Image (cartoon, rainbow, N blue to C red):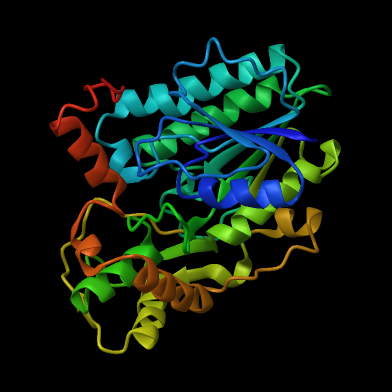
Amino acid sequence: MTNILVTGSEGYIGSVLTPKLIKRGYVVKGLDICYFQNPKKLKRNYSLIKKDIRQIENVDLSFFDAIIHLAALSNDPMGELNPKLTEKINYKSTIELARQAKKQGVKRFLFASSCSIYGIASKEVDENSPVNPITAYAKSKILSEKALLKMADKKFTVGILRNSTVYGYSPQLRNDLVVNNFVTCALATNKIEIKSDGSPWRPLIDVRDLSDIFIEFLDAESDKINKKVFNIGFQENNVQIKEVLEATRRAIPACEIVFSNKHGSDTRSYQVNFERFKKIFPKIKQKWTIEKSIFDLIKNIKKQNKEKDFYSDKFSRMATIKKLTTTGKLDKNLYWR
C-alpha cells in the first residue's frame, strides 16, 4: 500500500490522519468539499481534490492502492437537518465511491462507521449485537456497512471501523463532540450545562489514537480485516458523561457544572465491547487518555485561538453549515454556489 486517497481529508479526523500517513511514507491525495476553514498546506507527498463526494464520476481512482473514507455529514444533529440529504451524502455516495473503486482496481476500502448505530443499549454491545440507529446519521452508517460488506471479495478488501466518539485536539477542531464541547464551554463561560443527569454511557477515543488505528488497518493482512466489522476503541474508555464532566473540572477547577434536567434529542447510551479489535491488533494501546487529552486540548486552544473564537461558529459544524447556507454560499443541497 503506497498511494492512499483520504476522503474528508480536511476535516476533524482527516487533518490529523493525513500528516501521519505522510510521515509513515505514504503518498496521499485528499478529497474534500472544504466547508470548514482553509485546507492545510502540506508540501510533500500530498495534493487535494476540492470536490463534493457526490460528484466523483470523473475522478480517476485507478492510481490508489487504498481509500480511507471519512467524508460524511458528520454527527447526529447535523444529519437531522435534512435526513434525505444525509442519506444521499453518507450512504449513496459511499456506495458509489466503493463501486467505482472496485471497478478501477483499488485493493482496499476502509470505512469510518460509528458506534452510534447502537443507539440505546441496556447491556454491553459487540459486533454481533442488534443495532438500534436512532438518527439519520446512524441509519446512513448501517446502510453503508451492509452494502459495503456485500461488495467485498478477494480482490477488494473492505474493513468497517465502528468508531467510538472522538475527542482531542485537531487543526480542524470540533466542539460538537462531548469532551471537546465540555472543554470549550468551560473555557468560554466557566460553566458546563448538560441536558442529562450525567448517567449515559459513551465509548470515547482520541483523534490521534484513531488515526494510528486507521494506519494499522492499511498495513494489516487482508484476511484479518476483510468482510469484518470492528468496534474501535479501548475498554477503559467506556465512561459515563459525569466522568467526563469531573475530568474537565479537574483541569478547569473554576468551571461550574449545571444539570438543566431538560433532556435534549440525544438519548443515546451504550457500552461497547472491543475484544475483536483487541484480538486482531493486540499491540495497539491507548496513548491519549481522556484526562491527558483534556489538558492538551486546553493548552492548544489557548495557544492558537482568541476568546472571541469560543463565541463564533469557528468550531461548530452545525453553525458553520447554517451560516454558509443563510449567506447564500451554499445552496439548499449543500453545493457551493
Residue 198, horizontal then vertical, whole percent:
32, 72
Above or below, comparing residue 225 to residue 62 in the picture: below
Q: In the image, is 187 to the left or to the right of 46?
A: left
Q: Position of residue 306 (x, y in %)?
A: 26, 67
| Quarter of the view holding residue 289 | bottom right
Residue pictured at 23% horizontal, 51% vertical: 313
Q: Nearer the viewer, residue 261 or 28?
A: 28
Compared across the picture, whether 315 is left or right of 164 comes to: left
> Which quadrant holds residue 277?
bottom right
* Residue at the (20%, 55%) spot, across then down: 312
Q: Nearer the viewer, residue 183 or 246?
A: 183
Q: Is residue 225 visible?
A: yes
Q: Position of residue 284 (x, y in %)?
A: 74, 63
Residue at the location (21% across, 55% down)?
264
Q: Is residue 128 left or right of residue 223?
A: left
Determine if residue 199 is in view: no
Q: Quadrant where the C terminus lies?
A: top left
Query: Where is the N terminus found, in terms of image quarters?
Result: top right
Query: Which residue is situated farthest in the front direction here?
Result: 43
Compared with residue 104, is residue 86 higher up or lower down, i.e. above or below? below
User: Where is residue 225 shown, x and y percent of the image?
Assistant: 77, 40
25 vs 71: above or below: below
